[in-house]
Amino acid sequence: MDESNPVASLAILLVAALIGGMVAHRLRQPIILGYLVIGAAIGPHALGWVSDKGLVQTMATIGVALLMFTLGLEVSVTQLRQVGRVGLWGGVVQIALTAAIGVSVGYFGFHWTLDQSAVFGMGISLSSTMVCLKILMDRGEVDSTHGRIMVAILIVQDIAVVLLVLLESLLGAGTENPLWLLAVALGKAAVFVAAAIAAGLWVVPWFLGSVGGVRTRELFLLTVLVLCLAAALGTSVLGLSAVFGAFIVGLVLRESRFARQMVAEVTPLRDVFATLFFVSLGMLLDLRFVADHWVLVLVTVGAVAAIKIGVVFLVVRLFGYNGRIAAFSGFGLFQIGEFSFILAQTGLNMEVVTDEFYSLVVASAIITMLLTPFSMGVVSWLHQRARLPALPSLLTSTGRAGAGPLRLPRPPETVVVAGYGRVGQNVARALRDAGVPCVVIDIDPDVTYKSRSDNVPSVYGDASNIHLLESMDLKDVLALVVTYPDPLAVAATVQGALKLNPGLKVVARVHRQEDVDRIRRLGVVEVVSPEYEASVELIRRVLSAEGWRPDAIAGRIGKLRANPDVCEVGPEPAAGETPGGTGPA
């Protein structure tokens, strides 16, 4: 393809992405797999249909910047605070431990130079934000416990890119005072953060208000794009990571009243450029190198998987989470991240790594990205079919660990609430106000500690583990309410509870229709979908505003619940009839 025709290159990229995504969807595979594979097919190392690497790299950089900007806008401080320790300190420990093991494996195992081993260690310490977020969203697990842990660690990794790039710049530099260069770079980062906070508090909201007052969506969108790209450019000029600036500005603007509209306007562009980003990653894969060095590539992929899964699993376990959460987190974060390409490319430009090493890192990264959706699926399959005995640390209502199984009060009037997040807290509070005793199960030790301050008896452990449920004496409880958003954990909890007590009344929270069907097949008495209940309430209020009588509204709502696949509420009243039927309303 002629590099002087960027329009043709862009058209080929978009058409290829559409074809790859459709094929992956038809094969019931994650769409990003289609993007990566089609990128490798049309790239310069295969068919060579797109050879304008500069154009592709520019669009990919814009995609990453927009992703990090919207991630900053959408990051919930409350949710991150719930996994704050494992997200912040666990992320730091994971990066340091993975990098140290990677350097040792590269130097003693692969016999690379110390500089190449350092680049390898720093590169594999990072995971792919784009891949993980896309997989979590496709699986409906962003709000699950392991999803929040993964997102928190990914954010720490993205911020750490700044420090890692600075450390890499010291390799082979021969400078007499590398600590001074590091201090200067950290000072630049601190100055940018301070400037971003000041602008986000006093300048940007005023400017966005002025643009919003014009009531022109085009100007508002252009303003948001300028802010995002200016932040990315600002950090690039300072010698820092461009994505760091985009994320910081998004995080600062999250508290403004324009945050929701900014997300709504930027999201379509973000998705398009993110698609181009995955295609561009696939284009970097040299299939000829993989064919010639397939043994080395397989060994490297195996080493990376073993190191990262082991380290993440260990870190999450050390912070008090059970094996299931640790396994999902480890297998979800085991891939090499997109920012590792930046580290490898920087090392290549500095001549501290070889071309063969760069090709090896690229091939290993793309292969681990391709394997991530399958690894998550394998963990889900194993979790559903082979629940191993766990040794949960039980907390009684007094909060002391190791006090033995919790014996529920008699008569059987206790409700067990699995999950003490926002929904679980509301359920427990309502039950307490109604005089109904309840006990909470949660896998987060900090959450169970909070429940004690709310005077709610709690058990620390994984409610999806049947051995924990056995200790709860479910045969003598009134009902089980499953409130957490993780569909796999919900299904496992319900299945285990009904196995212990087939007549138990269970109320489960679900989101996707496929999860609703799966849970109902288990025999749940009641399934609650927040989206469905919201639609019912909207219908109720609309009909009330139209003048329908309460009994008529109740009838229509009953008809809707009897046939939830039918969204219509019935024909309009005939002429001469009031909305509630014949006669005056």
Image: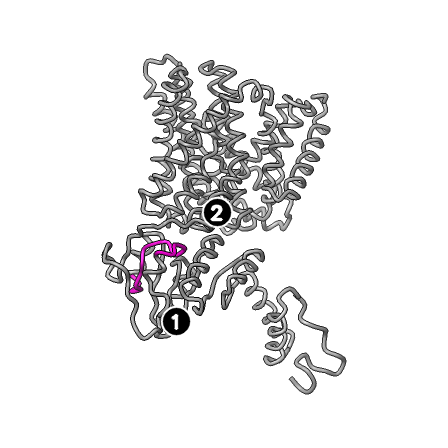
Residue 203 can be seen in this image: no
Relative to 509, 559 lies left or right: right
Classify 100 as above or below 500: above
Could you tell me residue 109's position as x and y percent? 39, 20
Quarter holding residue 537 = bottom right
Residue 312 image offset from top left, x and y in percent: 38, 38
> Which part of the image, by quadrant, shows the C terminus?
bottom right
Instruction: Verify whether residue 141 appears in magenta.
Output: no
Q: Nearer the viewer, residue 468 or 274?
A: 468
Q: How many badges with numbers are in the image?
A: 2
What colouring method underlies this structural image?
one colour
Q: Quick check: 137 above or below 40? A: below
| SS assignment at label 2 | helix
The mark nearer the N terminus, 1 or 2, is: 2
> Which residue corresponds to the image point at 48% horizontal and 56% vertical from the top-left?
491
Task: Classify 10 Å Cα crowding around label 1: few (below 14), some (14-19), many (20 and above).
Answer: some
Specify the label residue 396 is tagged with.
none
Q: Amino acid at mark 1?
A: Leu
The residue segment tinted magenta is 453-467
Q: Amino acid at mark 2?
A: Ser
Badge 1 is on which residue?
Answer: 478
Residue occupied by mark 2: 380
Q: Nearer the viewer, residue 216 or 466?
A: 466
**Residue at horizontal 70%, vertical 28%?**
9
Q: Assign the magenta stretch its main secondary structure.
A: loop
The spot of residue 378 in percent (x, y) is: 49, 43
User: Which quarter shows the N terminus?
Assistant: top right
The answer to whether residue 233 is above or below residue 345 is below
Q: CA distance from mark 1 to mark 2?
A: 30 Å
